[in-house]
């Protein structure tokens, strides 16, 4: 067991560091260091623009999507090299947020199911950030229950005609392409009648309506489809096999290790180290310490859990299911941390003006954003079910919707 | 105490004050004072008296109360009670104080068996059996749970078969608290396995000394043996001891369970008063524990849970005393208290450092007390409905959420899947 | 980076698991639980023969000279099996203290005996309620003799020797504390067994009356050595706790699959599934923190103090959490003496305090993180 770089790793790190020195957009460093969950933004510029420029520069230097094959815009790097890169990229990594869904989920799905021609055409631009991708899975009728979706795709000649609605689509408003799952056969059981496509978000008949979120921002959207035409060549996987294709996407989400999971702990530790209360520094207070310690060991537990996964990946093993705990642990933790940070400030914790911005503003944004961490990409309850069923081998729920044709499932008249 | 009409207040009305004075005077003259100190110090998992048999002391105290009209106060006089109002009962409990801890062995009889008898037994049986139950001369137990079904009580298998005017019982119960010192028990049996599980049950009461009843104590995780297995081999029960109609036993049992919920003021143990006392006297490395912010923060959290439970039960008492049925709020008591006691006990051990492990006589005062709590608490989270069942009850009966999807409900009992374990 | 145990270490873990499954089934643990023995002597001998007692002791002192990563995997298995032997006191506390501070002669005298199973050792630190702190040490040492009372001392009633923390000065500083080595069979010590929440592991009170003792390490350096010993023991104990957590989780899972209520396995109810999923989460976090602790321990990294506290806290929380909810999943059965659930619950709550309480380690962790940040 060791944490040391091997000679090759050390060399890779040196190269990365040198390149960063020469190329990173240093003028944003201070602002980015202070950004945290729910509040990654720049004073004078659009984060998406700055993000795109940075991603482009990385792609040119060979530092984008490092673990992807070179022919698709990557570097063919090892998992550990990816981690080393992330360590060296540091705070600038926060600029990659708009690309995470594309890199972590859409890209790998296209890689697994797209034709060679498509891969060579779409993936390099995805990697370089020129094109942003989104994931069109959730619908009003089904978020946890994705397989309950109703957006229809009907074959017409060589094309498919799409009608329906998606919801909660992050980044749809600035996306160029999307991964879309549809229902092609409502007469078979729900998981059997789905088909996956990708489409140009500028296609005729696609309408994106932003949704204002609970935290005041607008990051996700409703997307309406009215007679949208998708050529059959943009189908991913076989007709009726969309559920399996979507599992690949979701698995990839779980495997996208080393992806920086915000826990709120570093911010909280720093905040407590500097906050003066009536009787001294907050961090000297036993009650605060006890809480900090509990969070510290969760944060480090997550970190080392992902290191364990990286180690097994780099030995060519499939990482175990340990990684699925990340979001489950960190979602609630962010919420608790933000609540406590506001508590420490007393009544002033409620203020959000410019003066307060530096400290409590950060935690307020965390507080308001953290509920979504507990929902997006699988709710806490669904994750617990996954752990119980896939990791511990417990039986699934008793189901009323599984082996019946989709159009025979009870819907409460809706 | 009145929360609505004349504004909220906690003062005794003149009648209540008179009642309180009378109770206080009687307790002053009659309580077994020699045990007061020990009882005050006992807590969940550890009510013991040195040099005396607690069962005998408890029975003597119950008898004395009954003789003077202070037993089962809210029961009608003809059945051994006093016909008191719910508030009088609370006043009595406040005055009885630590001596109330002696009633532990009667809780099942007074809280569940008695009310079931009252609702379903013949007049003759009520007059015969209830007064000695009230006075503690006879102790009762509840024979519901079986190896195959605790949460799933309605899955029970103990058979009752009619033979002339009698019923013949064969089967096994488990987890029966106090069976080893009980005189009578209420017993839920299956009389028809060919109908749906809830439809083929019948309730009886029986003499625990009947031939064919065998009680085998079970040693608990805590080391004590308060519960038992009870085996029935061709035990005969006369039909006159049936409670409710044949095959209506599930409804009868719901009465029992409802009553359990209504036996308010029974005062669930939270461990908070003990922890507060302990922190008040404990010295840490850098001063009194009660001055430590971490200790305070935790104490405050426990304090509001304990007081929340207390005032929830007060609200129920107020409702009761106005003739309203208390709402379901009371079902939260055991759910909150069970895990709270567990946490409180763990924290009390923590506060003592390594010495928290010790439990010998000289450490009994603190460490031992909290250890007993720690070891008993898991039982609280299971007995009388597990935490999970309690949450289901709250979700379904209070919040109106749908029940689980069931595979066992509308099928004949003998067709329910058992994984081959018939 | 390689953040995993090596294949050889994993093989050793498998060997230890197999050995303990055979030699230390629950029945054997119960012999001690029920007071029929003070510890499992046959198992102790067997552990020696397997080379497990001396796995981290250098070959020159009769050990296997493997290392601390190997000791970690064995510790995990000891915790899983609830082995009723004085492993933690002898190996994590006494042997570590000797390795850190013992003279060559002291090592030669005791380490081979530890490795061969012929000597049981312990650390006599606490004097009643409270956590590790120099101020709490009152037992005095003067002219090579000790006077005072230590309690609780883990495995004190069966130990052959003890490392004793004593006061040798009164300046109010750490330098007031020195360590001594005492042969408990040589007289001058009264030993009294104390009952405790986990009867599978004894605790005792040791009263020193003009007891002869030899210094361990330099005078006035006792506190520094002790802090290191406790950190090292914290990592090793954390592995035991993780082993126990995993076993409790497994027991709960198996029972949930087997037990039928309402016509279906109770493991098909979400309420039960989610309890078990949460147990898995806490056990996994603890395991990962422990691996980091193992790395720091085995390389004597400067991160050890922080890593040890994190492993200790995380593993204590996980073991308490898993052992109590294992009972819950078992319903009434979990509350019987006959089922093994309560043995894990007892062990979890005993190990939670024996090296100093959770609150203490929480305080330590934040202190250490702060120091690191300041540096
Ligand atoms: C910030 C944010 C960004 C998102 N981005 C995207 C995106 O880019 N693309 C996309 O496709 N989707 C996206 N989503 C949608 C997200 O995946 C869904 O919201 C999520 O899967 C939950 O679905 P739902 O909202 O329909 O809630 P529901 O599924 O209706 O859940 C409601 C509640 O019921 C519980 N529940 C449901 N089923 C079960 C069950 N079987 N067992 C136990 N509990 C259950 C849930 O845990 C939850 O508490 C995003 C969501 C958020 C908040
Ligand atoms: C100290 C003590 C005293 C007792 N005294 C008596 C007594 O005097 N008389 C008597 O009749 N009984 C008594 N009991 C029995 C008690 O009522 C049962 O133990 C309890 O109802 C649980 O049943 P079980 O033990 O069969 O556990 P199970 O029902 O097998 O439960 C095992 C686990 O599964 C969970 N579970 C079961 N069903 C569901 C569901 N539908 N949804 C979600 N989770 C579920 C439970 O919550 C639990 O975690 C006593 C128990 C104890 C511990
Ligand atoms: C008020 C109350 C208190 C309880 N206390 C305990 C307890 O202390 N310990 C314990 O182990 N279990 C307790 N239970 C029972 C617990 O709910 C059962 O373990 C649980 O109901 C599972 O039984 P079941 O699903 O077979 O019955 P259910 O499916 O809940 O009920 C079966 C049938 O009984 C009837 N029924 C159920 N509840 C009521 C009601 N409140 N009023 C009228 N009819 C009803 C309905 O017709 C229903 O279809 C209590 C239940 C209730 C309602």
Image (cartoon, rainbow, N blue to C red):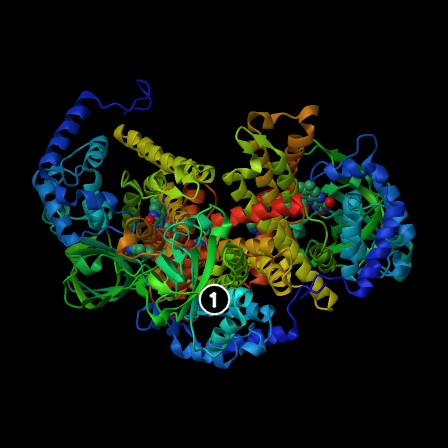
Question: Which residue is most to the front?
Answer: C143
Residue A175 falls in which quadrant of the image?
A: top right
Q: Residue at x 47, y 79 (%)?
A: C116
Please state the chain letter of the residue tagged with numbered disc 1 in the rendered image: C
Q: Which residue corresponds to the image point at 14% horizontal and 64% vertical from the top-left?
A: B210
Extreme-top residue of the structure: B6
- Specify whether residue C79 is in view: yes
Residue sticking out furthest to the left: B67
Q: Classify residue B214 as left or right of residue C133.
A: left
Figure quadrant of the N terminus of chain B = top left
Q: Is residue B410 visible?
A: no
Image check: A246 left or right of C302?
A: right
Q: From the viewer's side, name the closer residue of A348 and B147.
A: A348
Between A408 and C285, the one lying in front of the other is C285
SS at mark 1?
helix
Q: Which image quadrant shows ligand 1? A: top right
Would you say B98 lies left or right of A234 here? left
Q: Identify the residue under disc 1.
A: C94
Horizontal and vertical percent position of residue C150? 37, 58
Residue found at x 10% / y 48%: B60
Q: Nearer the viewer, residue C82 or B208?
A: C82
Q: Residue at x 70, y 24 (%)?
A: A354
Q: Is residue C190 above or below residue A150?
A: below
Q: Position of residue C143 (x, y in %)?
A: 40, 60
Specify the quadrant of the image occupied by residue A337.
Answer: top right
Left or right, C206 with respect to A49, comes to left
Question: How far across and down, in percent of the image, does residue A35 sit?
Answer: 73, 37
Number of marks drawn:
1
Image: A303 above or below B269 = below
């Amino acid at each position: 067991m060791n944490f040391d770089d091997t000679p090759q790793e050390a060399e890779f790190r040196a190269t990365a560091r040198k390149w960063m020195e020469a190329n990173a957009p240093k003028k944003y460093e201070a602002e980015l260091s202070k950004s945290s969950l729910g509040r990654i933004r720049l004073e004078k510029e659009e984060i998406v623009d700055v993000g795109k420029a940075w991603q482009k520069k990385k792609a040119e230097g060979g530092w984008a999507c490092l673990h992807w094959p070179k022919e698709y815009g990557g570097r063919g790097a090892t998992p550990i090299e990816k981690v080393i890169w992330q360590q060296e990229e540091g705070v600038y990594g926060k600029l990659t947020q708009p690309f995470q869904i594309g890199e972590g989920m859409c890209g790998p799905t296209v890689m697994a199911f797209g034709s060679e021609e498509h891969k060579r055409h779409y993936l390099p631009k995805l990697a370089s950030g020129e094109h942003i991708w989104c994931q069109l899975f959730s619908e009003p009728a089904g978020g946890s229950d994705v397989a309950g979706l109703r957006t229809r795709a009907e074959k017409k000649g060589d094309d498919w005609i799409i009608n329906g609605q998606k919801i909660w689509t992050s980044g749809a408003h600035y996306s160029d392409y999307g991964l879309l799952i549809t229902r092609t056969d409502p007469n078979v059981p729900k998981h059997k009648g789905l088909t996956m496509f990708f489409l140009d978000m500028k296609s005729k008949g696609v309408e994106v309506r932003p949704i204002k979120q609970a935290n005041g921002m607008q990051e996700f959207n409703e997307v309406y489809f009215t007679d949208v035409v998708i050529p059959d060549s943009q189908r991913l996987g076989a007709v009726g096999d969309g559920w399996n294709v979507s599992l690949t996407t979701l698995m990839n989400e779980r495997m996208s290790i080393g992806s920086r999971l915000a826990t709120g702990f570093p911010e909280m530790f720093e905040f407590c180290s500097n906050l003066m209360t009536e009787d001294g520094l907050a961090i000297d207070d036993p009650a605060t310490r006890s809480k900090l310690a509990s969070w510290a060991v969760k944060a480090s537990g997550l970190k080392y859990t992902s290191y364990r996964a990286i180690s097994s990946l780099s030995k060519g093993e499939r990482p175990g299911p340990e990684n699925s705990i990340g979001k489950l642990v960190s979602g609630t933790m962010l919420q608790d941390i933000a609540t406590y940070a506001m508590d420490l400030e007393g009544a002033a914790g409620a203020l959000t003006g410019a003066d307060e911005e530096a400290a409590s503003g950060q935690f307020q944004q965390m507080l308001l954003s953290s509920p979504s961490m507990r929902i997006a990409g699988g709710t806490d309850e669904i994750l617990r079910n996954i752990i119980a069923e896939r990791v511990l081998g417990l039986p699934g729920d008793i189901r009323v919707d599984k082996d019946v044709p989709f159009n025979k499932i009870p819907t409460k008249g809706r | 105490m009145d929360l609505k009409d004349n504004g909220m207040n906690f003062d005794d009305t003149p009648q209540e004050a008179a009642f309180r004075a009378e109770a206080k005077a009687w307790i002053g003259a009659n309580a077994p004072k020699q045990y007061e100190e020990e009882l005050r110090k006992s807590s969940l998992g550890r009510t013991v008296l040195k040099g005396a048999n607690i069962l005998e002391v408890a029975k003597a105290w119950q008898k004395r109360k009954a003789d003077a009209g202070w037993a089962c106060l809210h029961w009608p006089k003809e059945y051994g009670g006093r016909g008191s109002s719910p508030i009088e009962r609370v006043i009595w409990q406040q005055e009885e104080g630590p001596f109330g801890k002696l009633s532990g062995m009667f809780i099942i009889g007074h809280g569940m068996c008695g009310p079931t008898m009252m609702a379903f037994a013949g007049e003759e049986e009520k007059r015969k059996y209830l007064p000695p139950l009230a006075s503690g001369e006879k102790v009762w137990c509840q024979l519901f749970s079986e190896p195959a079904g605790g949460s799933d009580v309605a899955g029970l298998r103990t058979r009752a078969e009619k033979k002339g005017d009698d019923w013949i019982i064969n089967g096994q119960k488990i987890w029966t608290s106090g069976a080893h010192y009980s005189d009578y028990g209420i017993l839920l049996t299956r009389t028809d396995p060919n109908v749906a599980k809830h439809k083929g049950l019948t309730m009886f009461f029986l003499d625990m000394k009947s031939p064919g009843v065998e009680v085998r104590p079970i040693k608990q995780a805590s080391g004590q043996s308060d519960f038992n297995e009870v085996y029935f081999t061709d035990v005969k029960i006369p039909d006159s001891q049936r409670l409710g109609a044949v095959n209506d036993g599930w409804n009868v049992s719901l009465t029992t369970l409802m009553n359990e919920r209504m036996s308010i003021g029974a005062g669930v143990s939270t461990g908070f008063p003990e922890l507060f006392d302990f922190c008040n006297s404990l010295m840490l490395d850098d001063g009194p524990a009660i001055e430590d912010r971490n200790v305070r923060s935790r104490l405050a959290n426990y304090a509001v849970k304990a007081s929340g439970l207390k005032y929830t039960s007060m609200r129920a008492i107020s409702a009761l005393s106005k003739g309203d049925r208390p709402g379901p709020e009371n079902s939260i008591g055991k759910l909150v208290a069970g895990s709270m006691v567990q946490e409180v006990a763990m924290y009390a051990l923590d506060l003592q450092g390594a010495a928290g492990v010790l439990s010998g006589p000289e450490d009994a005062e603190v460490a031992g007390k909290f250890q007993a709590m720690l070891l008993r608490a898991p039982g609280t989270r299971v007995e009388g409905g597990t935490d999970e069942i309690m949450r289901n009850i709250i979700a379904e009966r209070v919040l109106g959420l749908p029940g689980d999807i069931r595979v066992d409900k509308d099928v004949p009992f003998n067709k329910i899947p058992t994984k081959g374990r018939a | 980076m390689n953040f995993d145990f090596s294949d050889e270490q994993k093989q050793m873990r498998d060997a230890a698991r197999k050995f303990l499954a055979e030699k230390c089934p629950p029945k054997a643990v119960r012999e001690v639980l029920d007071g029929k023995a003070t510890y499992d002597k046959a198992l102790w001998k067997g552990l020696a023969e397997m080379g497990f007692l001396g796995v981290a002791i250098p070959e020159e002192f009769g050990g296997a000279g493997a290392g601390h990563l190997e000791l970690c995997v064995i510790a995990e298995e000891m915790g899983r099996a609830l082995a009723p032997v004085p492993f933690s006191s002898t190996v994590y506390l006494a042997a570590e203290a000797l390795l850190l501070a013992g003279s060559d002669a002291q090592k030669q005298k005791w380490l081979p005996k530890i490795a061969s199973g012929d000597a049981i050792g312990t650390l006599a630190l606490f004097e009643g309620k409270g956590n590790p702190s120099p101020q709490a040490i009152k037992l005095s040492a003067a002219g090579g003799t000790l006077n005072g009372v230590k309690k609780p001392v883990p495995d004190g009633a069966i130990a052959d020797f003890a490392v004793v923390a004593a006061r040798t000065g009164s300046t109010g500083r750490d330098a007031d504390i020195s360590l001594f080595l005492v042969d408990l069979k040589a007289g001058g010590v009264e030993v009294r067994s104390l009952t405790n929440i986990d009867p599978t592991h004894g605790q005792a009170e040791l009263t020193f009356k003009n007891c002869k003792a030899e210094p361990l390490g330099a005078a006035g350096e006792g506190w520094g050595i002790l802090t290191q010993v406790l950190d090292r023991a914290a990592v090793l104990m954390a592995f035991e706790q993780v082993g126990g957590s995993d076993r409790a989780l497994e027991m709960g899972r198996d029972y949930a699959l087997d037990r039928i209520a309402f016509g279906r396995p109770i493991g098909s109810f979400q309420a039960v599934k989610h309890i078990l999923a949460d147990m898995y989460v806490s056990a996994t976090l603890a395991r990962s923190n422990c691996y980091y602790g193992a790395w720091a321990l085995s390389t004597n990294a400067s991160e050890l103090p922080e890593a040890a506290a994190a492993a200790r806290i995380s593993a204590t929380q996980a073991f308490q959490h898993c052992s109590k909810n294992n009972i819950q999943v078992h319903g009434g059965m979990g509350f019987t003496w006959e089922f093994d659930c309560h043995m894990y619950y007892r062990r979890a709550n005993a190990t939670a305090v024996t090296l100093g309480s959770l609150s203490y380690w929480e305080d330590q962790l934040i202190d250490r993180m702060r120091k690191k940040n300041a540096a």
